[in-house]
Image (cartoon, helix red, strand yellow):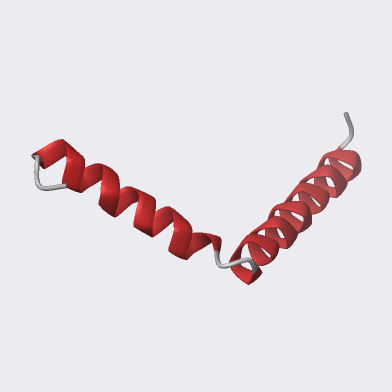
Amino acid sequence: MTDKNRNTAGVFLLLAGLALFVYGTHRLEPDVVMMKAITICMECIGIG
């Protein structure tokens, strides 16, 4: 693989990851993940 192809693939993957990050943030996924994490932690220590 040449350096130009490797750089192109890297840029493409970076842009794809950024697009998925923005899409997930737009759907309020961080809030869902945080609520699940809090629930799991509460269950682990026996409060929930």
Answer with left or right where residue 9 lies relative to residue 40.
Answer: right
The residue shown at (72%, 53%) is 14
Q: Is residue 30 above or below residue 13?
A: below
Q: Position of residue 9 (x, y in %)?
A: 83, 43
Q: Is residue 24 left or right of residue 31?
A: right
Q: In x, y percent, where is residue 40?
A: 27, 43
Q: Nearer the viewer, residue 14 or 28?
A: 28
Residue at figure coordinates x 89%, y 45% from the top left: 4
Seen from this angle, which residue lies furthest top? 1
Taking the spot 54% from the left edge, 60% from the top edge, the residue there is 29
Q: Is residue 28 left or right of residue 33?
A: right
Q: Residue 6 location in percent, x, y?
A: 82, 39
Q: Residue at x 16, y 47 (%)?
A: 48
- Where is residue 8 drawn, in percent x and y? 87, 48
Pick the front one: 47 or 9: 47
Specify the quadrant of the image occupied by residue 19: bottom right
Residue 5 located left or right of residue 23: right
Foreground residue among 24 and 13:
24
Quadrant location, the N terminus: top right
| Residue 7 drawn above or below residue 20 | above
Q: Residue furthest bottom?
A: 26
